[in-house]
Structure formats: structure tokens, C-alpha cells
Image: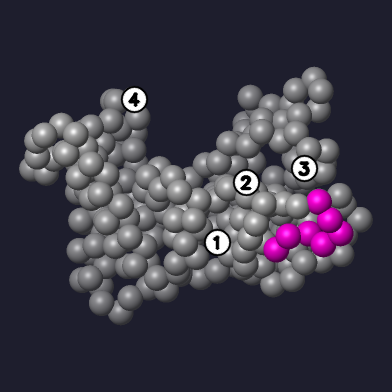
Amino acid sequence: MERSTGDITDSGTIRERLKRLPVFPLPNGVLIPGGHLPLHVFEPRYRALVRDCLRDDRLFAVGLLEQEELVGAKPPAIRPVAGLGEISAHAELSDGRFFILVKGIARTRILEELRSPKPYRVVRAVAVHEEHPLDAEQLSVSTQVLKRLVSDLTRHLPEEAGKPMAEACLAEPDPGLLADTVASAVLVDTAQRQRFLEELDVVRRLELMNLAVAAVLERISSRSGGRTFN
């Protein structure tokens, strides 16, 4: 699989891309910043999207469909908040299909869908900014609780998975990105992932992840019949 070698995710590149942003709509896929989403691209219109992105800046949005895509003249609605992603690795098969790995970069809000000669959908979007609390102590406490919970959780995972996750989370200085990284790994349900993506309050995202990781630990503890916390 071929991987991206350059960093094209500077703010100027993103601002320009958001003016005409290709969208890959999915009925059950949500891209969270800091996470990765593997995609098997087989429809001709999305093969064209991938080819165009690889020739350009590798950026496009992953948007959650309000309902499964139906045959008809009117395309189904896409949820307004979508994940902006970069193709970080790709492999093209002999029949034109792609396997790609998309890295989550930012939250975006779709403002309008644009007319385009392309076979795929194109929108105008803006970057979505996080809401930071005035209470720095609350932010710090929520951050430290999440790091402790993640540390507890990773001890129950195979070392090859748990150790990198623990190291990444414990070393992450940005509370919002910490919450996003954990959510990308822990949240499985599509609706939960979309609600998390739409949550702009950083403390609220940390609290949601504290609850989610604690619930996972509780299930592990119940199955093992022992305590999980130290």
C-alpha cells in the first residue's frame, strides 16, 4: 500500500479545499479527527473521487447519510457535520478498485451542496471550532481521569495494541485531540460516533469518553469476576 509522504494539511490548503470539498457519503461510517477509517472503494463515482484527490491534495470529507442511499433523482441528505480526512495510504487494484486509509484531520460543517460536473458530490464547508471551558481546572481533571482510564483499559488489551494506544494517549497534550483519539478507538456504534463528532464542547467530549471507557472496563470486570481499577 502506497503511503503519503508529505504534510499537506496546513491551514491554507484546508481553507482552499473547503471551498469545493468532495464528499464520500456513507450510511454507517464516521471519521473522527485523530482516527483512521479504512475504505474499500468500488463504485465508479468514488473511484473517480479517489483518483482526483490523489492527483490533488488527498483531502475529502466523509459524511454520514441521513438514511441509506436510495435510487432516485434526489440524493439523500448528509449530516451537516462531517469529518475532513486525508488519504494517508492507498492501493489500486487491477480492476480499478481502491483500498484506502483515511486519516481524520478536522470537523467541518457543510454549508451547501455545489453543482459540479464530477460524478461525486461536492460541497462548500467551513472548519468547526471547538468550545473550550473557562474553568481550566475542570478541563485538567477530566483530562487526567481519561488518561488514567485509558491506562487501565490498555492493560487488558494485547500488548501490540494496548501499548501504542497507551503511549499515544498519555503523551497527547491537547485535551480535545485526546478525547477524539480515544473515541476513534472505543466507539463502535455509528450513531454514537456521529453524536461525538458533532459535540464541540471539549469537556463534554472528555466526559463522554470517561463514561464510555469506564463502561468497557466494567464489562471486562464483570466477565473476569474481579476488579479493574487499582
Q: What element carries label 3?
A: helix
Q: Which residue is drawn at 30% across and 52% down?
A: 212
Instruction: Name the residue beneath numbered marker 4.
Output: 160
Q: Is mark 2 on a helix, strand or loop?
A: strand
Of circles 4 and 3, the one toward us is: 3
Q: In which quarter of the image is residue 113?
A: bottom right
Image quadrant where one finds the N terminus: top right
What label sits on residue 57 in the rendered view? none
The Cα–Cα distance between marks 4 and 1, rounded to whole angstroms, is 29 Å
Instruction: Name the residue beneath numbered marker 1.
Output: 107
Q: Where is residue 156 in the image (x, y as percent from the top left)?
A: 23, 32
The Cα–Cα distance between marks 2 and 1, rounded to whole angstroms, is 12 Å
| Amino acid bearing label 3 | Tyr
Contact, CB < 8 Å: mark 4 with mark 2?
no
Q: In which quarter of the image is residue 5?
A: top right
Which of disc 1 and disc 2 is earlier in sequence? Answer: 2
Pick whichever, 100 or 19, lies toward us.
100
Q: Is residue 5 visible?
A: no
Q: Where is residue 165 in the image (x, y as percent from the top left)?
A: 34, 38
Q: Can residue 198 be seen in this view?
A: yes
Q: Give the range drawn in magenta.
A: 71-77
The Cα–Cα distance between marks 1 and 3, rounded to whole angstroms, is 21 Å
| Residue neighbourhood size for the residue with mark 1, other residues' Cα within 10 Å, grouped as few (<14), some (14–19), many (≥20) | many
The Cα–Cα distance between marks 4 and 3, rounded to whole angstroms, is 33 Å
| Residue neighbourhood size for the residue with mark 4, other residues' Cα within 10 Å, grouped as few (<14), some (14–19), many (≥20) | few
Instruction: Confirm whether the magenta stretch covers residue 109.
Output: no
Which of disc 1 and disc 4 is earlier in sequence? Answer: 1
